[in-house]
Image (cartoon, rainbow, N blue to C red):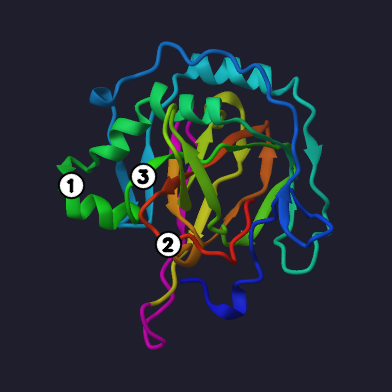
Amino acid sequence: MPPKSKQAKRSAGATRKDETGLISRVETAVPRWPPLTHLPTAADLTLTSVLSNQILTITGLWTPSLCKTYVSFLSTLPLVTTPGNPKKGEAVRVNDRYQTQDAGFAEQLWSATALRDLVNSPSIDGRLFDESEKTALWGGEVLGLNDNIRIYRYNPGQFFDQHYDDANNVVFTAPGSQSVPAKTTWTLLLYLTSPATGCQGGETVFYPEPTSKRDPTPQPVITELDVGMALLHRHGRDCMLHEGRKVTAGVKWVIRSDLGDSTLIVDPDLGEV
């Protein structure tokens, strides 16, 4: 759980408050995304534990050719550079981003890739989880991905300082069924570039806390960029302090969403970021 003294270092979101004080999202146009084709199946992939019950990766969720197609496409979107001087309580982030609400693309990311099958039948480091272990891992029944899609581009010199990712209230609506309130529990980062494409730096680094004041501070956990790799990490109250290191060469491209769970109590104090 993030220490109370550090909870102000949260992830900045493109939100605004209306005249009633309620939080709403800043909307942008829905892009015409390139089709998700020639993807590996769940039988070809696996969940790998980087840090037990905290950080997982899926190597090769997207192929290099699909990542290249998306880098070309995303470069045409009207990305906006985040300010170098954030608002009080927000982490320093200097990058270019695009954000849109797109339930259709979120569903494609979830079900057209191997992600849904890997999450619903998690086999981590070769061991298949039973139902109780699966519920404990994800925090409930995972319905899919948050339809708040975020695109991040980091050019040389850009970075995301140490912060925690907030949990958010979301709503899932299946065709012909009622809306289901849910809460996000895990961040999803899909890397489209890496040192193989000329991107240097930009690693996502996590800072575990000692289990007690007497214990030494654990070493940081560094996740290197890999084209087509998905990184999942817990967020909200269980989020670990982390950062996106400065890119020193090339360009870092990331697609961001979140896992949403239906069986958790939706927190009325949470906004949607």
Please identify, in this view, whether the residue under mark 1 or under mark 2 is nearer the observer. Answer: 2
Residue 255 located left or right of residue 188: right
Tell me the residue at 73%/59% (across/down): 22
Please identify, in this view, whether the residue under mark 3 or under mark 1 is nearer the observer. Answer: 3
Pointer 3 local density, CA inside 10 Å: few below 14, some 14–19, many at least 20: many
* Distance CA(mark 1)–CA(mark 2): 24 Å
Please identify, in this view, whether the residue under mark 3 or under mark 2 is nearer the observer. Answer: 2
- 64 up-or-down from 170: above or below: above
* Amino acid type of the residue that numbered disc 3 sits on in the rendered structure: Val
Question: Which residue matches tag 2?
Answer: 265
Q: First in sequence: mark 1 or mark 2?
A: 1
Q: Is residue 228 in view from this perspective?
A: no
SS under mark 2: loop
The circle drawn on residue 129 is 1
* Amino acid type of the residue that numbered disc 1 sits on in the rendered structure: Phe
Tell me the residue at 40%/79% (across/down): 216
- 16 up-or-down from 231: above or below: below
SS under mark 1: loop
Residue 103 location, quadrant: top right
Range of magenta residues: 211-230
SS under mark 3: strand
Please say if the residues under marks 1 and 2 sit with CB atoms less than 8 Å apart.
Answer: no
* Amino acid type of the residue that numbered disc 2 sits on in the rendered structure: Ile
Tell me the residue at 45%/12% (across/down): 37
Question: Which residue matches tag 3?
Answer: 142
Residue 232, image x and y in percent?
43, 46
Residue 195, image x and y in percent?
55, 31
* Distance CA(mark 3)–CA(mark 2): 13 Å
Q: Is residue 12 magenta?
A: no
Please say if the residues under marks 3 and 2 sit with CB atoms less than 8 Å apart.
Answer: no
